[in-house]
Image (cartoon, coloured by chain):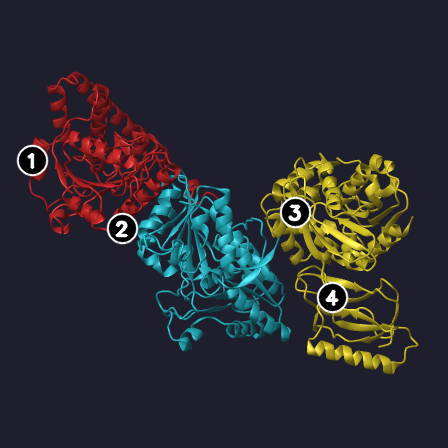
Chain colours: A red, B yellow, C cyan
Amino acid sequence: MTDTLSTAVSHELDGNALLDAYRTMRTIRAFEERLHDEFATGEIPGFVHLYAGEEASATGVCLHLDDRDAIASTHRGHGHCIAKGVDVKAMMAEIYGRRTGSCHGKGGSMHIADLSKGMLGANGIVGGGPPLICGTALAAKQKGTGGVGVAFFGDGASNQGTTLEAMNLASVWQLPAIFVAENNGYAEATSSTWSVAADNIADRAAGFGMPGVIVDGFDFFAVHEAAAEAIQRAREGGGPTLIEVKFTRYFGHFEGDQQTYRAGEVAYARENLDCLKRFRARVTETGQVEAARLDAVDAQVADLIDAAVEEAKAAPKPTAADLETDVYIEY
Amino acid sequence: MNDAIRKVVMPKWGLSMTSGKVTEWIASEGDEIADGDDLAEIDTDKIAGALESADEGVLRRIIAQVGEDVPVGATIALIAPADVPDAELDEAALLAREELDSGAVAEVAGPVTGSVEVDGRTVCFAALGEGEETVVLVHGYGGDKNSWLFVQEPLSQSHTVYALDLPGHGESTKDVGDGSLDVLAGAVLGLLAERGIERAHLVGHSLGGAVVVAAAAREPARVASLTLIAPAGFGSRINAGYLRGFAEARSRRELKPHLAALFADPGQVTRQLADDLMRYKRLDGVDKALGALLGTLLDGDEPALDVAPLLSEVDVPVAVVWGRQDAVLPATNGEGLDDVEYVERAGHMVHLEQPNAVVVAVNAVTNRR
Amino acid sequence: MARTISYREALGEALAQEMERDESVIVLGEDNAGGAGSPGEDDAWGGVLGVTKGLYHRFPGRVLDTPISESAFVGAAIGAATSGLRPVAELMFIDFMGVCFDQIFNQAAKFRYMFGGKAKTPVVIRTMYGAGLRAAAQHSQALYPIFTHIPGLKVVVPSSPYEAKGLLIQSIRDDDPVIFCEHKAMYDVTGDVPEDSYTIPFGEAGVVRDGDDVTIVAIGRMVSVAEEAAKQLAESGVEAEIIDPRTTSPLDTETILESVENTGRLVVVDEATPRCNLATDISALVAKEAFGSLRAPIEMVTAPHTPVPFSDALEDLYIPDAQRVANAVKTVVEWKR
């Protein structure tokens, strides 16, 4: 059942939608590159895992979603958050451990969430998200909202029992769920060519009785197209789909990773495969969006990220009074 | 056995009681006993209370020892006039002892429970006795039909005695509508109608007192007499703090201190009482019902009810019983009423603390014509 | 009205009444209906012990059988709870927490705090615990202390049919994740249970018996063991106060401390193994907060630090019984400096 989709026909995106998609991808890229620089200064606490290079996946999928729909993410979750509409400044403040952050400084990079936007949280546990998405999809199905659940997970999580159990359950219950395996080539420092016993993660879909597709993760249009089909099928009661998105992450597993296990694939990808470059080339060549408008977006995004960092640094940290609040709703 | 020898049996206080223990014999062998005298302290796993004598004579033999678990209905003592020979009492005592030891005690019939539908609400009741005339017992705010346990059985010896759960209480529907006296009086009258009781003696405690007055005013022909025990709706004083405390308490810990206001003897406030009341308060809908009824009882910190005008319209025998130490509706509230019997060593819950005073008053008023 | 019904029936009634009241309540778990996809009857089982029997037909589409995939369906219950449902998932045996614990303690328990107070996860995980059915090491443990240890979870251990119904309804209406631990040897225990719906608030201990000589705090099924011991002790003139915390998280510390301040002696009876269990937790609480009231060292009656054995000869020794409780009480009552 596995198909390989190359760059397919764009799914009816008008100029504004394309510009939105570009803005999202650019925001993610700028956010992550800035974090890469800021982390090096030592000012950002804890663990940070960057999504740069993978922007087309979160953006191409989430462009189809609205507030009925929920997504679950991974420890590499900033891109999913931005694509699902979480406030960028609140995210930055959260990563800086500030009280003004999305989670008031109690979650950090690995736990940014905004349930009002259907963003069920970045997740520090590999394979933590897919079972949860069965639940949000079940809720949508029970309530008849037409909503879907999307579980983003990595090649590492594709080997977790939770992910496999969740795919089976979603198929057994015919849930409106989409499983997006973001295969960036590495689970920590281990290559997916070694850790995933199948040729492709998407091949596993057959074992769960659901369609599986492979898409070029550097190609926004390919992701967008595959997601469109899967999401439409889910909304119409056709059950779950597994989409494997293949690409390379631009940074290490975490900030500080020396990446001695890698060869030169990042430089090659940045130069020849990069999703933003390809997007820009395509939409300007077809005349759908003028380059100047893209440039304007770049500038706006840069300003936004500057402001986000500046505000985050200036924001207050949580206080002792916050330590024991919000463990329970009522206790 | 000589008919002059009267058996004192383990009483059945409430539906679930199957046995009890004498924790103390108040009377001793040889004591002269009058009707209504306290004979013994009885303890069940749920409640403790004093057993009052229903006979007069001399306490001739004690059968059940302190601490002995005795089934309901079993003979625990014998009362007889002084001239009955000892030999006859020895024989009767031996039989009673054998019965107790064998465990072959005939089961005592408890109240018959049932329910009727009134205005879309289920009204539950427990009926006891087969007397020609009917007595209906109406509890107060937060009470239920079981609060009459010490009164219903003695009254049932001469009457058919109904104890009901008002809407919002016990096992009845918890919806009380606007919580008005009219809704509650309607439930009492509805019970009479549904059970085919043409005329009944109504006994009401506290809020129930106001309810039975309202019922009598609404359908005077159905009411043979009224016994008002610490009734609401008379006088100018009310313990608003108690009422709100009771309504708002969320746990046994919060509730228990308020309950002290109910009794002259603080020892009556047992953990079991508080537990039972919490079981009631936890039922869905009770919170809302108690809130609505609070509005019926209170206007700010003042009494909201005045049923004296209603009572003046009613032409039936009326008895009023009030505990001297009532801290919820103080006894001075009875000043405007005729022939109030003030009961010593009783707080608001006269029928629990001094049940005999209530039994005597009801028996007297039901015999008045 | 109150009738005598079993622990099993009380639980089933709580589920049915809540499903009737609130259509966002759903039930899911292995064989909660039973017979899914099979040629014979559907609703064949109603859960392995019949608690959910009958709900499948009464509430169409709201009782979901699951594959044997605890991570997936417990996680699904948690995810659904974040999205507007009030799922009651049945984790058949508490021992199976081992295959789905991440979803409970890293996901459900932490959402609210980790997301800055913005998440609401009203999920109930019903699960069977306890020894006594010769079910051996992987189907008999009393693992509620592990859940009690986790901030963000509420843990309920009902000791009777009355508590079972009221606490389950409270669990379903509660907006936090609740682990509801049913003792597998109690399903046929009967007791008075009101027909109406009612809730028992969390963090309010029940005082099962009054006494001035010693406080016995007992968890779950151990409450009835303590009552049996107290009856024996009363014959020798020792009156024990028995406290049933009902919920181990939150824990009603006040009722325990007040009682110990009165009795001066404490025995804790906990079916869990002895390290870091409720017995040690409550003992530490009392030692710290009521040290001045203690007239004797605290006694703990627990299972031994072993897996649950299979053979009846061993399992009967493993489970705390009334004699051991009575002996512990005698030790504290007779203790002299």
State the CA–CA distance, disc 4 to disc 1: 93 Å
Residue C168 image label: none
The answer to whether marks 4 and 1 mark residues whose Cβ atoms lie closer than 8 Å is no
Q: Are marks 4 and 3 on the same chain?
A: yes
| Count of numbered tags | 4
Q: What chain does badge 1 belong to?
A: A
The answer to whether marks 3 and 2 mark residues whose Cβ atoms lie closer than 8 Å is no
Relative height, residue B336 to residue A21 (above, below): below
State the CA–CA distance, disc 1 to disc 3: 79 Å
| Location of residue A235 in the rendering, given as x and y in whole percent from the top left corner | 30, 34
In this rendering, the label closer to the viewer, 3 or 2: 3
In this rendering, the label closer to the viewer, 1 or 3: 3
Circle 2 is placed at which residue position? A165
The answer to whether marks 1 and 2 mark residues whose Cβ atoms lie closer than 8 Å is no
For the residue pair B112 and B60, the one nearer the viewer reads as B112
Q: What chain does badge 3 belong to?
A: B
In this rendering, the label closer to the viewer, 1 or 2: 2
Circle 1 is placed at which residue position? A268
Q: Amino acid at mark 3?
A: Ser
State the CA–CA distance, disc 3 to disc 2: 49 Å
State the CA–CA distance, disc 2 to disc 4: 62 Å
For the residue pair A3 and A163, the one nearer the viewer reads as A3
Give the quadrant of the N terminus of chain B.
bottom right
| Location of residue B42 in the rendering, given as x and y in whole percent from the top left corner | 74, 66
